[in-house]
């Protein structure tokens, strides 16, 4: 299964910052592209997609000569893309990138606002990010 021709918009915010870069993720001709990462030397990368229980799962990899590789994993459900990003430097995951809420899930609603959704996103992904940060701090 392919995601070719699909585009998703949001905002990417660097950890600890208040403002971020507009993000457009595009799937085209078997390639994945993140507009926000272009400024850091990341280009297009191949992606794989397969049917998941509740959508279409994907994995993509992009690379920058200066910053290393980014491995993207996620699920597309209709007009919504939920995903994670792991930065690899010298083949090892960067242990100090943590995000939750609108920072990592900007524009998940498309338009409009449903009461409590933002709080739920923050709570669920906040716990995941917090557990990762605690594990990193202990090591």
Image: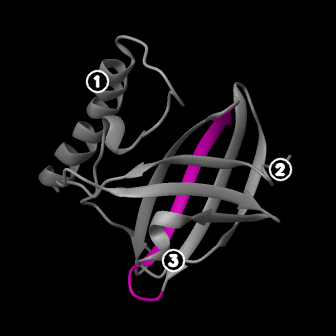
Q: Position of residue 89 (x, y in %)?
A: 38, 77
Q: Which residue is mark 1?
A: 123
* First of labels 3, 1 by sequence position: 3
* First of labels 2, 1 by sequence position: 2
Q: Is residue 43 left or right of residue 11?
A: right
* First of labels 2, 3 by sequence position: 2
What's the residue at 27%, 45% (across, down)? Answer: 132
Structural distance between the alpha carbons of marks 2 and 3: 22 Å
Q: Which residue is mark 2?
A: 2
Of all residues, the one furthest to the front in this rendering is 112
Q: Is residue 74 rendered magenta in the image?
A: yes
Label 1, secondary structure: give it: helix
Structural distance between the alpha carbons of marks 3 and 1: 31 Å
Q: Position of residue 80 (x, y in %)?
A: 60, 33
Q: Based on the displayed image, in which of its 4 quarters is residue 72 positioned?
A: bottom right
- Crowdedness near tag 2: few (<14), some (14–19) or many (≥20) residues, C-alpha within 10 Å: some
Whether pointer 2 and pointer 1 mark residues with C-beta atoms closer than 8 Å, the reply is no
Structural distance between the alpha carbons of marks 2 and 1: 32 Å
What's the residue at 28%, 57% (across, down)? Answer: 97
Q: Position of residue 66 (x, y in %)?
A: 39, 87
Residue 42: which disc? 3
Question: How many labels, in total?
Answer: 3
What's the residue at 43%, 18% (across, down)? Answer: 113
Of all residues, the one furthest to the right in this rendering is 1
In the rendered view, would you say 11 is above or below 95?
above
Residue numbers of the magenta segment: 65-77
What's the residue at 77%, 62% (across, down)? Answer: 28
Label 3, secondary structure: give it: loop
Q: Nearer the viewer, residue 136 or 29?
A: 29
Q: Position of residue 123 (x, y in %)?
A: 29, 23
In the rendered view, would you say 38 is above or below 105?
below
In the rendered view, would you say 135 is above or below 86?
above
């Amino acid at each position: 299964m392919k995601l070719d021709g699909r585009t998703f918009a949001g905002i990417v915010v660097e950890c600890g910052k208040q403002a971020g870069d507009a993000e457009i993720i595009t799937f085209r001709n078997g390639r994945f592209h993140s507009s926000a990462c272009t400024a850091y030397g990341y280009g297009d990368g191949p992606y794989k997609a397969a049917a998941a229980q509740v959508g279409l799962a994907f994995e993509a990899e992009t690379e920058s000569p200066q910053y290393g590789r980014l491995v993207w994993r996620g699920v597309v459900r209709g007009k919504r893309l939920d995903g994670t990003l792991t930065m690899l430097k010298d083949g090892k995951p960067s242990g100090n990138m943590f995000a939750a809420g609108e920072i990592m899930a900007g524009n998940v609603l498309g338009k409009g606002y449903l009461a409590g959704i933002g709080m739920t996103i923050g709570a669920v992904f906040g716990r995941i990010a917090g557990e990762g940060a605690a594990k990193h701090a202990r090591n």
